[in-house]
Image (cartoon, grey):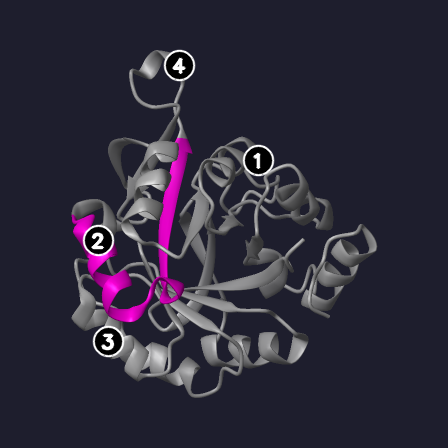
Amino acid sequence: MKEVRVIPCLDVKDGRVVKGVKFVNLRDARDPVEAAEAYCREGADELVFLDIMASVEDRGTRLEWVKRVAEKVTIPFAVGGGIRDTKDMKELFDLGVGKVSINTAAVRSPELIAEAAKEFGKERLVVAIDGKKNPPSSGLPRLEVMVKSGEESTGKDIVEWAKKVEELGAGEILLTSKDADGTKEGYDLEMTKAVAEAVTIPVTASGGAGKLEHLYEAVTIGKAAAVLAASIFHFGEISIPEAKKYLKERGISVRM
């Protein structure tokens, strides 16, 4: 079994790390540079930085925020939010970012996935998919792709979209359940498993981690290759070493 990655996520708004529930009611967590340095020391495998208001505000990623973190981070570092084209990606790579994550832009222009994979290599390209569950009577896919920080429905089925992004050249998928986000009630295992089993590229589970068991379930039931969390790490409820120790003791391969 490949090593499962444990990834803290920095949702950044107005230059601060924030955390909400179901993408709303954001509260301040900490300074992004301070958070990045702490997670590097604790042994996080990667760090994800999301400029969460960029697509909502129809603007590019705030490079000055990314630059401050990139100067301090010592582990692989992915950035998402407001990336619209390969020029935006190149600016981020030039700052020292290891991977870029696209969501709204990928849905709007799927050809961007193929273009970016060809230009930078698929290993540097993450396609983020935000999803929600719909009731059977809605006439919409049960698992539906959302864009613009979860504010806009697309009518796209998540599993079909995941297969498409793999086909176009994405190196991995960052899958977030809008319904589970920030609830601390566990990842959406149905959604995670459905996507992970439909593709061969790694899928990172995101949205809903509240206790150590949730991380284990995301890997064993949800078939995730990595677990991403925010609240539990930001507010000191669970540390990165604790999470890794727990997984290792249960037979999950992690980098200690």
Secondary element under disc 3, as helix, strand or loop, is helix
Q: Amino acid at mark 3?
A: Lys
Q: Residue at x 45, y 62 (%)?
A: 18
Marks 3 and 4, the one that precedes in the sequence: 3
List x then y, in percent, for residue 97.
Answer: 38, 77
Q: Which mark is residue 105?
A: 2
Q: The residue under label 1 is which amino acid type?
A: Leu
Q: Which label belongs to residue 90?
A: 3
Quadrant containing the C terminus is: bottom right
The residues bearing labels 4 and 2 have C-alpha atoms spaced at a distance of 28 Å
Q: Which callout, 4 or 2, points at the residue further toward the start of the chain?
A: 2
Secondary element under disc 1, as helix, strand or loop, is helix
Task: Please identify, in this view, whether the residue under mark 2 or under mark 3 is nearer the observer.
Answer: 3
Specify the farthest residue to the top: 137
Residue 218 visible to the viewer: yes
Could you say where residue 39 lies in the image, as x and y percent from the top left? 59, 74
Depth check, front residue: 205 or 238: 205
Percent x, y of residue 32? 46, 75
Where is residue 61, by image quadrant? Answer: bottom left
Q: Are marks 2 and 3 in contact (CB under 8 Å)?
A: no
**Which residue matches tag 1?**
189
Residue lying at 67% horizontally and 65% vertically, measured from the top left:
236
- Compared with 142, 130 (above or below) is below
Report the residue marked by disc 4.
136
Locate residue 62, reporting x and y percent: 27, 73
Residue type pointed to by label 2: Ala
Q: Are marks 4 and 2 in contact (CB under 8 Å)?
A: no
Secondary structure category for the residue under label 4: helix
Measuring 23% from the left and 45% from the top, which residue is drawn there? 107
| Range shown magenta | 109-132
- Alpha-carbon span between mark 2 and mark 1: 26 Å
Tag 1: Cα neighbours inside 10 Å, few (<14), some, or many (≥20)?
many
